[in-house]
Amino acid sequence: ALVESQHAQRIEDRAALRAAVAAEPVDREALEMLRREYLARAQATSETLTAHLADALEVLDPEQRERLTARIDAFRAHH
């Protein structure tokens, strides 16, 4: 659900940005509002993802967390 709502929001954000870019005269307040809204959503998403990560990590034993760390390292080595 989070990914779907973010996708829909990105579509709305692009439309709002296009309108702000095309506005005559330049609407600095509208651009600032878009920036603040974007940052607020990014912060909320980051907090949610961090909380979910912590929830998941709490149920793993140390060996499972070590395996997860190894998988993260392997993934990062390829990207």
Image (cartoon, rainbow, N blue to C red):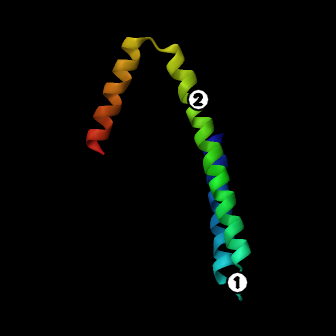
User: Cα distance, mark 2 to mark 1?
Assistant: 40 Å
Question: What residue appears at the point 56 percent right and 34 percent down from the top-left corner?
Answer: 50
Local packing at callout 1 (Cα closer than 10 Å; few below 14, some 14-19, many 20+) is few
Give whichever of 37, 79 is nearer the camera: 37
> Could you say where residue 21 lies in the image, as x and y percent from the top left?
63, 79
**Please, what secondary structure does the residue beneath circle 1 have?**
loop
Query: Based on the displayed image, in which of its 4 quarters is residue 17 positioned?
Result: bottom right
Going by the numbered disc 2, the residue's amino acid type is His
Q: Which residue is mark 1?
A: 23
In this rendering, position of residue 56 left or right of residue 15 = left
Q: Residue furthest bottom?
A: 24
Question: What residue appears at the point 71 percent right and 80 percent down from the top-left corner?
Answer: 27
Give whichever of 21, 43 is nearer the camera: 43
Q: Which residue is mark 2?
A: 52
Going by the numbered disc 1, the residue's amino acid type is Ala
> Could you say where residue 78 lies in the image, as x and y percent from the top left?
27, 42
> Could you say where residue 62 lies in the image, as x and y percent from the top left?
40, 12
Q: How many marks?
A: 2
